[in-house]
């Protein structure tokens, strides 16, 4: 990262009817970073991304994206942004090559054949260039969508739930590619619900009810929340869960394979709750450090699904 700011917006606000979907949102993103958007359905993630990249005009707020004014220079912003949606939106009755050629023409690019060849090669699609897009698996469709997003060499990549329905290996390969782009100075903004993607982000903003509730480097989030945690192994885990889930001091309880993690902000109350089940047959109890996954579960539990008009993510 160079420290150069790519996105600098303040007070972005958007309403649909009487519902405020994004409420005075601030965002500052340095070049080459991977910035994650988390939050329940309807929290404003998609609407925020669309305002930042010039696809949607905010009702209030100001700022710049790639040095262009988000209110008055949306056309310039869109020309330098790659936007990948959750749903595959390319032409299924065209081949991989034909889809990429279409997007190259759409952007009015020179050296079209060379650019398309390079895009196909960079994502390992050489052997499939003539295959119809509609016949591709989810992972290969994802690769094609990313290649189309990057055909015009954008400086900013916006990913809206980009790997929904894609298998874990394809997600890992996808993120290896995103990391490669980041090393070349491409900035990425991504909304996701997958924990293996959350950990790929340099920084995370958590959004609920249209407001940004948390904005911090990924590794610092558990400490910022102030969570304490205990791990319970063996014993009757279903019985233990039933006893603990409503106990004072237990803010979240989650199964992790053959163990239970219980977390809370008040360590004294949490420890007292755990002490009441220490005598259960076979159970082992250990205090652990709350990690990103516990923090993520806590944040999601604290925010009800606030799905609303105009924003499905």
Image: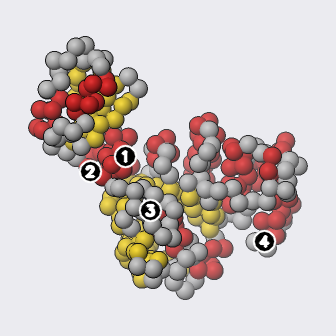
Earlier sequence position, callout 1 versus callout 3? 1
Earlier sequence position, callout 4 versus callout 2? 4
Q: Within 10 Å of the Cα at label 2, are there few (<14), some (14-19), or many (20+) other Cα atoms?
A: few
CB of mark 2 within 8 Å of CB of mark 3? no
Write down the quadrant of residue 19 in the picture. bottom left
Q: Judge depth for marks 3 and 4 and give the one in front.
A: 3
Q: Which mark is residue 107?
A: none
Q: Residue furthest bottom?
A: 72
Write down the quadrant of residue 75 in the picture. bottom right
Horizontal and vertical percent position of residue 238: 32, 25
Q: Judge depth for marks 2 and 1 and give the one in front.
A: 1
Residue visible at 45% across and 80% down in the picture: 17
* In the rendered image, the vertical position of residue 64 relative to residue 83, given as above or below: below
Q: Which mark is residue 224?
A: 2
Residue visible at 35% across and 56% down in the picture: 304
CB of mark 1 within 8 Å of CB of mark 3? no
Distance in Å between CA atoms under marks 4 and 2: 45 Å
Distance in Å between CA atoms under marks 3 and 4: 34 Å
Q: Within 10 Å of the Cα at label 4, are there few (<14), some (14-19), or many (20+) other Cα atoms?
A: few
């Amino acid at each position: 990262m160079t420290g150069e700011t790519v996105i600098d917006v303040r007070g972005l606000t958007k309403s649909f009817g009487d519902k405020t979907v994004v409420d005075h949102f601030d965002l500052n993103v340095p070049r080459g970073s991977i910035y994650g958007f988390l939050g329940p359905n309807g929290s404003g993630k998609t609407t925020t991304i669309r305002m930042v990249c010039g696809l949607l005009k905010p009702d209030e707020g100001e700022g710049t994206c790639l040095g262009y004014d988000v209110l008055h220079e949306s056309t310039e912003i869109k020309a330098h942004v790659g936007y990948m949606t959750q749903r595959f939106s390319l032409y299924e009755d065209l081949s991989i090559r034909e889809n990429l050629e279409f997007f190259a023409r759409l952007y009015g690019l020179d050296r079209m054949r060379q650019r398309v060849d390079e895009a196909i090669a960079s994502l390992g699609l050489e052997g499939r260039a003539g295959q119809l897009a509609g016949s591709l698996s989810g992972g290969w469709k994802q690769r094609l969508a990313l290649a189309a997003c990057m055909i015009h060499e954008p400086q900013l990549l916006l990913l809206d739930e980009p790997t929904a329905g894609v298998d874990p290996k394809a997600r890992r390969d996808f993120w290896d590619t995103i990391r490669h782009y980041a090393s070349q100075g491409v900035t990425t903004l991504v909304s996701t619900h997958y924990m293996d993607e959350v950990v790929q982000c340099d920084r995370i903003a958590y959004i609920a009810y249209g407001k940004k509730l948390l904005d911090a480097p990924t590794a610092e989030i558990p400490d910022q929340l102030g969570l304490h945690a205990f791990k319970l192994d063996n014993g009757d885990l279903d019985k233990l869960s039933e006893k603990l889930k409503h106990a004072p001091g237990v803010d979240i309880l989650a199964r992790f394979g053959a163990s239970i993690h219980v977390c809370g902000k008040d360590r004294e109350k949490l420890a007292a709750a755990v002490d009441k089940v220490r005598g259960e047959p076979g159970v082992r109890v250990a205090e652990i450090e709350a990690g990103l996954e516990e923090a993520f579960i806590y944040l999601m539990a604290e925010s009800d699904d606030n799905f609303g008009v105009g924003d499905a993510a």
